[in-house]
């Protein structure tokens, strides 16, 4: 498989995961781009394992979160008000409901759903990536789905 085919096959799910790991779509785009560049630099002659790129996204998102926390702490200590306005007019209502519902879950639960459903990773791969057992990954996934069902059910009733 060449890089163009690999990108067509994996870009959407990688982008979705990046959006779940970051606060804004622009941050997600930056994290995703950095992760893909890192993957290309490490394996320029062949396409990387998609699970590896998920781990690059996760690591870069954590780094970005730390940077943002330091900036926020600095801004608060300097009495500077930071305001971030996020708008996305092109999203459908159902996609927006799902993203909001996923965002309300604890990060370890939403991460299991995104990696399994959109990332296509097995519980074994998720466990390895997150340094947890495959059974724990599976349990987090099932618990997250149950909470999402309840949330959607409550919104629709």
Image (tube, rainbow, N blue to C red):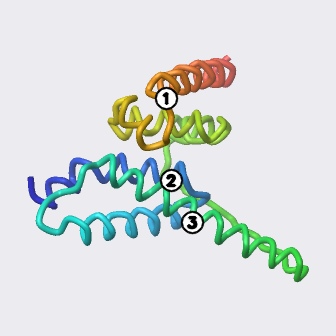
Residue 74 is left or right of residue 133, and the answer is right
Of callouts 2 and 1, which one flags the residue occurring earlier in the amino acid sequence? Answer: 2
Query: What is the distance, in whole Å, between disc 2 and disc 1 at their CAs?
Result: 20 Å
Q: Are marks 2 and 1 in contact (CB under 8 Å)?
A: no
What's the residue at 53%, 60% (across, down)?
A: 61
Where does residue 29 sit, x and y in percent of width and height? 44, 65
Residue 53 position, x and y percent, is 34, 55
The disc label shown at residue 137, or none? 1
Query: Mark 3 falls on what kind of element?
Result: helix
- Please tell me which residue is depicted at 89% across the width and 78% down the height of the picture: 77
Q: Is residue 103 left or right of residue 135?
A: right
The Cα atoms of the two marked residues, 3 and 2, are separated by: 15 Å
On screen, residue 26 above or below 56: below
Q: Quadrant of residue 35?
A: bottom left
Task: Kindly identify which numbered label has been placed on residue 63.
Answer: 3
Image depth: mark 3 or mark 2 in front: 3
Considering every residue shown, the one lying at the far left of the view is 1
Of tags 2 and 1, the one toward the viewer is: 1
Which of the marked residues, 3 or 1, is nearer the chain's N terminus?
3
Q: Mark 1, residues whose alpha carbon is within 10 Å: few (<14), some, or many (≥20)?
A: many
Where residue 58 appears, as percent x and y from the top left, is 48, 54
Q: Earlier in the sequence, mark 3 or mark 2?
A: 2
Q: Nearer the viewer, residue 52 or 37?
A: 52
| In contact (CB < 8 Å): disc 3 and disc 1 | no
Horizontal and vertical percent for residue 131?
A: 49, 40
Q: Is residue 135 above or below residue 11?
A: above
Q: Which residue is mark 2?
A: 19
| Corner quadrant of residue 119 | top left
For the residue labelled by badge 1, is the local secondary structure a helix, a strand or a loop? helix
Residue 47: which numbered mark, if any?
none
Q: Label 2: how many residues lie within 10 Å, few (<14), some (14-19) or many (20+)?
A: many
């Amino acid at each position: 498989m060449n890089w163009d085919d690999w990108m067509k096959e994996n870009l959407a799910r990688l982008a979705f995961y990046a959006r779940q790991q970051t606060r804004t779509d622009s941050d997600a785009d930056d994290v995703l781009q950095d992760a893909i560049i890192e993957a290309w630099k490490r394996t320029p002659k062949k396409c990387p394992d998609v699970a590896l790129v998920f781990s690059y996204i996760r690591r870069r998102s954590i780094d970005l979160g730390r940077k943002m926390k330091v900036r926020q702490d600095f801004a608060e200590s300097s009495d500077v008000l930071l305001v971030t306005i996020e708008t996305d007019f092109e999203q459908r209502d159902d996609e927006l409901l799902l993203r909001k519902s996923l965002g309300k879950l604890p990060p370890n639960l939403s991460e299991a759903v995104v990696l399994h459903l959109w990332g296509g990773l097995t519980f074994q791969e998720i466990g390895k990536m997150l340094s947890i057992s495959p059974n724990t990954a599976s349990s987090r996934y099932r618990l997250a789905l149950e909470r999402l069902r309840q949330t959607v059910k409550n919104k629709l009733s």
